[in-house]
Structure formats: structure tokens, C-alpha cells
Image (cartoon, rainbow, N blue to C red):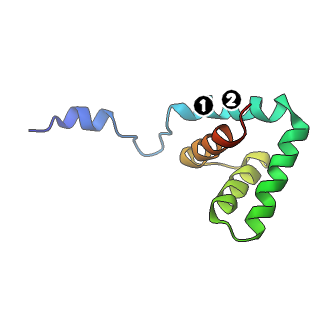
Amino acid sequence: MKNNNLEDSSTLKNGEYHPSADSALKWYKIFIFSDIKRWHQIKESIASTSLSGNRLSEILMGTINRLENELPVSDRYLLGLCWFLKNNFEK
């Protein structure tokens, strides 16, 4: 028998974002500003790969553009971007 209260409390409600999104956004900003020249090189690489039709890069670039233009970004897109950057470029 399932405990419905446990399931309900572990599911994000409509309009609620993942609690880790706050720390992901903070990490993203620190990552960018810790080496701005390197960030521009990474961003250019992602943009270039995006233009060649790479789906992951298209999604990453769209997320970066939304963040830079202060537009809404889904928590899962933000978390995905940070995971990608952390796995591939964190020193």
C-alpha cells in the first residue's frame, strides 16, 4: 500500500521550481565571472556546435540566451546547463 502523503510531498507542485535551482543559478554566475574570457570561448563553442544542428547545444544556447536576457528559464533547463558545464568545463 502506497502512502499518498509521501508521494505528494515529493512531487513539485504547479508553479513550484526545483529547490536546487537557486544554488544552480548561483553556481552558474560564479562559473561565468570566475573567468569571463574562458566563458566567452565556451559560449562560442556551444553556439558554433548549435549552428551545426547539435540538439544539446541548441538547448544549451537557448537557455544561455534566456538567462542573459533575463527571461524565464525552466528549472530543468537551468539544472541541465549547469550539469553540462560542470561536467565538461569545471576546473
Question: In front: 54, or 65?
Answer: 54
Relative to 60, is 9 above or below?
A: above
Q: Position of residue 62 (x, y in %)?
A: 70, 57
Res 82 quadrant in image? top right
Q: Which residue is mark 2?
A: 26
Res 9 quadrant in image? top left
Q: Position of residue 1 (x, y in %)?
A: 8, 38
The secondary element bearing badge 1 is classed as: helix
Q: Position of residue 53 (x, y in %)?
A: 70, 71
Question: In front: 78, or 42?
Answer: 42
Q: Name the residue type under label 1.
A: Asp
Residue name at image x 76 percent, y 53 percent:
65
Question: Alpha-carbon neighbours of circle 1 within 10 Å: few (<14), some, or many (≥20)?
Answer: some
Res 47 quadrant in image? bottom right
Q: Which residue is mark 1?
A: 22
Is 62 positioned to the left or the right of 36 in the image? left
Q: Label 1 near label 2: C-beta < 8 Å?
A: yes
Question: In front: 72, or 32?
Answer: 32
Residue name at image x 69 percent, y 59 percent:
57
